[in-house]
Image (spheres, rainbow, N blue to C red):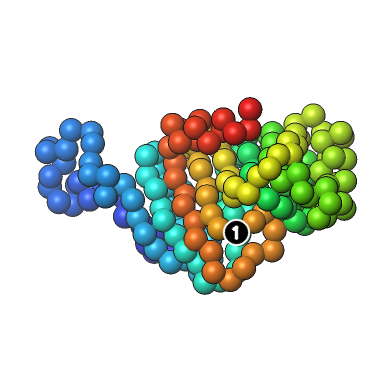
């Protein structure tokens, strides 16, 4: 069985015997954890409400890898993707996950340069949007790399250095579970 590399705040309160001194709030430092991950499975768990993981990897995986990891564990009600580019395999996998009942709605904000840089992907996005009422695409001058995932009670925000396609070896990620941050980032999709 894999050992959880990330501490649980409630366990710290209990183990320290200081739970009576906590009035529902802890140091912001205790809500932020830092680690290197080789695979997304190293995470073991999703951040608790208000918790943030700062991660980096020296292995090839992208923000999309987190989506797959979460979709195996939870139904994703909403998925928002913001990127300069997106891979064809990613689009096809997202559509399959949607067809298999793992994802509800998908909204993608993609750079308008995708039309000239990768017309095949642009056509695939337009086709998916035309055929699927729960698949929306927005084009704009965009270079952000954000994923928003609403899954049950989780409001996950993923930000990283990689695009939504084949990944470079070195990437950094921020994974947080905060409804306020989720709603703030979601504004770029409206």
The x and y percentages for residue 143 are 63, 49
Which residue is located at x 16 percent, y 41 percent? 19
- Is residue 77 visible in the rendered image? The answer is no
The x and y percentages for residue 76 are 61, 39
Q: Is residue 172 toward the left or the right of residue 8 in the image?
A: right
Q: Nearer the viewer, residue 151 or 182?
A: 182
Height in image: 106 above or below 36?
Answer: above
Height in image: 83 above or below 131?
Answer: below
Q: Is residue 64 toward the left or the right of residue 27 in the image?
A: right
Q: Nearer the viewer, residue 6 or 161?
A: 161
Would you identify the image quadrant in which residue 6 lies?
bottom left
In the picture, the quarter occupied by the N terminus is: bottom left
The x and y percentages for residue 81 are 64, 43
In the picture, the quarter occupied by the C terminus is: top right
Which residue is located at x 85 percent, y 40 percent? 126
Q: State the residue position of label 1.
A: 162
Which residue is located at x 15 percent, y 51 percent? 16
Secondary structure type for disc 1: loop
- Is residue 17 visible in the rendered image? The answer is yes
């Amino acid at each position: 069985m894999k050992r959880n590399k990330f501490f649980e705040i409630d366990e710290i309160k209990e183990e320290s015997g200081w739970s009576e001194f906590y009035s529902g709030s802890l140091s912001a430092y205790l809500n932020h954890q830092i680690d290197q991950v080789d695979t997304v499975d190293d995470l073991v768990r999703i951040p608790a409400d208000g918790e943030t993981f700062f991660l980096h990897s020296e292995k090839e995986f992208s923000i999309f890898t987190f989506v797959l990891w979460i979709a195996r564990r939870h139904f994703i009600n909403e998925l928002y993707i913001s990127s300069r580019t997106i891979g064809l395999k990613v689009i096809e996998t997202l559509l399959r996950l949607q067809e298999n009942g793992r994802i509800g709605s998908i909204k993608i904000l993609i750079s308008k340069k995708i039309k000239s840089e990768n017309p095949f992907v642009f056509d695939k996005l337009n086709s998916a949007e035309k055929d699927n009422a729960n698949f929306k695409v927005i084009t704009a001058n965009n270079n952000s790399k954000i994923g928003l995932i609403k899954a049950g009670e989780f409001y996950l925000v993923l930000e990283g250095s990689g695009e939504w396609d084949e990944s470079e070896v070195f990437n950094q990620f921020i994974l947080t579970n905060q409804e306020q941050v989720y709603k703030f980032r979601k504004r770029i999709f409206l």
